[in-house]
Image (spheres, coloured by chain):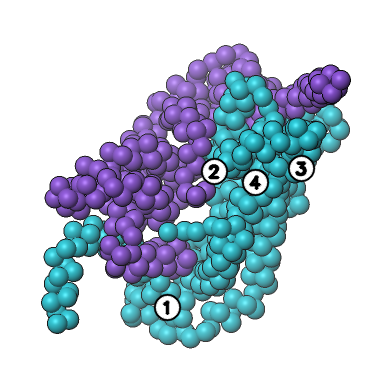
């Protein structure tokens, strides 16, 4: 009976299962096998001995990890930089979207929009290459700052100013694109609302305050909540391409730390342990943020 | 009387609007100008003489116009090789990703009652979105699979972005079920249904995803740095990354021979400018899609 039901199912649906074979295979090999590979964090992994031959280490690496002072500062940097970037980026995007939405000149608007989203499509290798030169000690930005204030700012070597650079360059690269996503949500607002408000004598700012802002609040909430789910990331590409040893104290994040320790110094087990810590916290945050997005912003995946 | 008052009120509002519009427009134009000024600087420096650029005398317009930097880049054989690797990668990656993503999206776009195991597949995919083994286990795995120095490591492990699957399946869901039923009555099987009905109806959606895919592969650099051990296997962005770090490292030496035709700055900027060209080529298409509100997957009805 069970058998025949299976055959009946397969005779009707085998093609769909065949379609799912590639994704099944690829995810199994490249996503699920590495999950098992996390066991490396619990052994003294030696590349010559391999995964099965390396000696067991138990929780040694985790103990080591939590006693390291650099680890605490790495976690702190990650959270601080991420949160700072999320708050500033969302604020900038909303302001930019509102300004752009008020712009009536269509031609100008599309040019500005194009200029704003362009950096989003370049890699951080390219952007950091340009930025490192622009903000350098003799660079064009410091020439400008020097002409205005008579001083220079060491964006690339001062730990505090480096964070400013991270925040500002993040806005430069992503705010335009975010704003366009928000503007797409604005298109969904019923124009009758604006007409009704005009008849009631609402001014431009009143309409912005009482119609536009509530209209985009949902998508902004969703973008923010989903970004909060990725708070353990902090932006590897950006930081790796911009930073250097002098500002490491203020800008080393978990991902760059894992790369330096795990790949560059060959401490595979330590790297995996730190990575596992990140994944565990990250997954909890991601699930929580998706739940929150579903509840408060009507977001739904699949 | 009432009408008059309404008109006068409207006029006053119009006047206020123009003042506001003026400030808003000026601010926006200024912001956009600041936003693109690094790129103007990039082009200006790349086309200036080494004499000017090494003394940081170029701002937004070339001085002592020179194409020497570009000549030097074109003479760099490794740059051409890296570009070719990138082109191969973009082509392979886009074709594989699009084919497999479309294939995956079809069964999971069907309603539960039509394809019961859908739930299993969805969960299977969701888990990979939420949790991953992390960098080191993936690195160990790919090394053990002898994927090091192979172009396949750049395109296969991430061949099916689940996010793209979601975008396509949402598009598939909006196809009216009556079309599907009609095709089923005509005896279409699943493959025929996908190829003859779903795919032709979803071309605009695919076009956007393809552009994103091309850009994503063109811009990827980290996997190349991880898995390619020889410089002539680097994709362009990885090569560029290595080049930029090496150029900023030899800065001190260059001071000695400042009067060269090409400074390391204009050279670096010439490299960067060339790496941006493909993005500039697809950008008009891209911005058109984006302007039309095709921001995929982010808003759902």
Chain that bears disc 4 = A
* CA gap, disc 2 and disc 3: 36 Å
Q: Mark 2 sits on what residue?
A: A124
Q: Mark 1 sits on what residue?
A: A39
Chain that bears disc 2 = A
Towards the viewer: B130 or A204 = A204
Residue B227: in sight, yes or no?
no
Judged by depth in the image, the label closer to the viewer, 2 or 3, is 3
Q: Earlier in the sequence, mark 1 or mark 3?
A: 1
Crowd class of label 1 (few under 14; some 14 to 19; many from 20; radius 10 Å): many
Q: Are marks 1 and 3 on the same chain?
A: yes
* CA gap, disc 4 and disc 1: 44 Å
Q: Mark 3 sits on what residue?
A: A209
Q: Earlier in the sequence, mark 4 or mark 3?
A: 3
Q: Residue at x 33, y 80 (%)?
A: A52
The chain painted purple is B
Q: Mark 4 sits on what residue?
A: A216
Towards the viewer: B285 or A69 = B285
Q: Earlier in the sequence, mark 1 or mark 2?
A: 1
Q: Is residue A296 left or right of residue B163?
A: right
Q: Are marks 4 and 3 on the same chain?
A: yes
B27 lies above or below B185: above
| Pointer 4 with pointer 1, Cβ within 8 A | no
Residue extending farthest top: B64
A49 lies above or below B184: below
């Amino acid at each position: 009976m069970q058998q025949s039901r299976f055959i009946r199912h397969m005779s009707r649906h085998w093609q769909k299962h065949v379609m799912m074979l590639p994704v099944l295979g690829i995810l199994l090999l490249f996503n699920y096998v590495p999950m098992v590979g996390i066991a490396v964090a619990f052994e003294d992994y030696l590349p010559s001995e391999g995964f099965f031959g390396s000696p067991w280490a138990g929780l040694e690496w985790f103990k080591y990890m939590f006693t390291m002072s650099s680890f605490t500062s790495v976690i702190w940097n990650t959270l601080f930089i991420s949160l700072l970037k999320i708050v500033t980026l969302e604020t900038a995007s909303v302001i930019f979207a509102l300004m752009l939405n008020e712009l009536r000149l269509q031609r100008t608007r599309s040019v500005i929009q194009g200029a704003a989203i362009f950096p989003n499509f370049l890699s951080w290798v390219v952007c950091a290459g340009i930025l490192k030169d622009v903000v350098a000690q003799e660079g064009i930005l410091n020439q400008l700052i020097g002409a205005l204030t008579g001083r220079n700012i060491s964006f690339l070597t001062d730990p505090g100013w480096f964070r400013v650079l991270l925040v500002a360059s993040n806005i430069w690269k992503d705010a335009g694109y975010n704003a366009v996503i928000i503007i797409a949500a604005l298109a969904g607002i019923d124009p009758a609302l604006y007409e009704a408000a005009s008849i009631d004598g609402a001014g431009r700012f009143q309409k912005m305050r009482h119609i536009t802002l509530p209209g985009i609040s949902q998508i902004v909430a969703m973008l923010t909540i989903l970004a909060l789910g990725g708070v353990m990331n902090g932006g590897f590409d950006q930081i790796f391409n911009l930073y250097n040893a002098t500002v490491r104290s203020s800008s080393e994040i978990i991902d760059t730390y894992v790369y330096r320790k795990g790949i560059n110094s060959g401490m595979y087990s330590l790297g995996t342990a730190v990575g596992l810590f990140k994944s565990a916290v990250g997954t909890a945050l991601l699930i929580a943020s998706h739940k929150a997005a579903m509840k408060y912003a009507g977001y739904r995946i699949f | 009387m009432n009408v008059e008052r309404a008109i006068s009120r409207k006029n006053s509002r119009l006047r206020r609007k123009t003042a506001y519009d003026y400030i808003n427009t000026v601010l926006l134009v200024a912001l956009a100008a600041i936003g693109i000024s690094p790129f103007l600087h990039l082009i200006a420096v790349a086309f200036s003489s080494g004499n000017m650029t090494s003394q940081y005398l170029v701002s937004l317009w070339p001085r002592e116009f020179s194409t020497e930097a570009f000549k030097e880049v074109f003479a760099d054989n490794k740059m051409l090789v890296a570009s070719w690797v990138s082109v191969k990668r973009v082509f392979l990656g886009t074709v594989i990703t699009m084919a497999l993503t479309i294939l995956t999206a079809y069964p999971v776009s069907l309603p539960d009652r039509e394809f019961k195991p859908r739930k299993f597949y969805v969960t299977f995919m969701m888990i990979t979105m939420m949790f991953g083994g992390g960098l080191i286990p993936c690195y160990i795995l790919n090394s053990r699979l002898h994927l090091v120095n192979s172009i396949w490591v750049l395109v296969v492990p991430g061949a099916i972005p689940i996010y793209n699957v979601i975008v396509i399946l949402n598009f598939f869901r909006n196809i009216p079920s009556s079309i599907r039923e009609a095709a089923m009555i005509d005896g279409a099987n699943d493959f025929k249904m996908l190829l003859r009905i779903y795919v032709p109806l979803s071309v605009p959606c695919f076009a956007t995803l393809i552009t994103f895919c091309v850009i994503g592969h063109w811009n990827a650099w980290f996997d190349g740095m991880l898995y390619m051990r020889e410089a002539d296997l680097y994709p362009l962005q990885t090569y560029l990354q290595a080049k930029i770090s090496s150029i900023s490292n030899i800065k001190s030496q260059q001071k000695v021979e400042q009067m060269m035709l090409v400074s390391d700055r204009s050279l670096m900027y010439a490299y960067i400018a060339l790496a941006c060209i493909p993005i500039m080529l697809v950008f008009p298409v891209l911005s058109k899609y984006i302007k039309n509100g095709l921001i995929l997957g982010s808003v759902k009805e």
